Amino acid sequence: MTIFLRALLASAALALAACAPLPKTTAYAIPSPADAAYSNPTSSVYIGNSFFYFNNGITSHMAPLIAAGMPGFKHRSTMITISGSGADWHDVASYFRPDAVGKYSFDANNNVVFNKLDRLFDVAVMMDCSQCPIHPQLKSVFTDYAKKNADIARQNGARPVFFMSWAYQDVPAMTKQLADAYTQAGKDNNAQVIPAGLAFARSVELRPDVNLYIADKRHPTLAGSYLAACTTYATLFKRSPVGSSYTAGLDPSVARHLQQVAWDTAQAYAKQ
């Protein structure tokens, strides 16, 4: 089940901030590096903004990618997004409160399934606003909240993962700046980083005819969202999306290109 929290007014952000924080100790088990959740997470929460929810949301592409690449593997995902939000807009602790987010799902016959959970989420994939990590007035906030939110995720049994967003189409210099910022945050917080921004840059270099941006030069087209999902799949599961039967309705040659870019980028980034 996907949850959309779209705040178009400042009052919505204030409402989220008013949620009571969860105590540091919870009933959820904290994973160790040997835990299977590190290689094959069975649940995930995506915390971010419109870059996640465009084109029916990243979770709607992750689910069929996982189903195609890992037949029989069960994965539950939830998306919590606020339009235009930075990391500091989200009350991440409140997303882990008991009997709330992720409490139930729907099966293939539309029956409600109440989830019995050892821990709420295996991974928490988080992004800041599209320019916050490199904005002179906000980059310190990014650093502070990368640590704060990573710590909250771990306290609640989830592995923190940072989603490296992409450059604006007309400001390609943002690619390296964002990559540097997210890479440093990953190192500082011992967190995995999904190099979606580097995948966008690689795709543009190899096939500029495949448009990843809508008219505003910021938000993703369907191809852009698909590339982001393929890169996320390759990073979280360490599996190649190349040849996946799920193509999001894209031209097969375009889908194959994006699959290959995602895999090549994820592999190259992991070796750094």
Image (cartoon, rainbow, N blue to C red):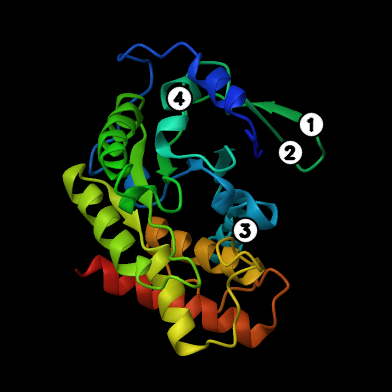
Residue in the image at 48% along x and 19% along y: 17
Q: Kindly indicate whether the residue at mark 3 contacts the one at mark 4 (C-beta within 8 angstroms).
A: no
> Residue 236: image x %, image y %?
40, 55
The alpha-carbon separation of the residues under discs 4 and 1 comes to 30 Å
Residue 249 in view, yes or no: yes
| Between discs 4 and 3, the one toward the N terminus | 3
Q: Which residue is mark 1?
A: 111
Q: Which residue is mark 3?
A: 61
In this rendered view, identify the residue nearer to me: 143 or 241: 143
**Given the image, on which type of amino acid does mark 2 rest?**
Asp
In this rendered view, identify the residue nearer to me: 148 or 66: 148
Q: Kindly indicate whether the residue at mark 2 contacts the one at mark 1 (C-beta within 8 angstroms).
A: yes
Q: For the C terminus, which image quadrant?
A: bottom left
Q: Could you tell whether 46 is left or right of 251 in the image? A: left
Residue 246 in view, yes or no: no
The label number, if any, that marks residue 91 in the structure image = 4
Q: Secondary structure at mark 4?
A: loop
| Between discs 2 and 4, the one toward the N terminus | 4
Q: Could you tell whether 107 is left or right of 5 in the image? A: right
Q: Which residue is mark 2?
A: 107
> Residue 67: image x %, image y %?
60, 59
**Given the image, on which type of amino acid does mark 4 rest?**
Asp
Residue in the image at 41% along x and 37% along y: 87
Q: Kindly indicate whether the residue at mark 3 contacts the one at mark 2 (C-beta within 8 angstroms).
A: no
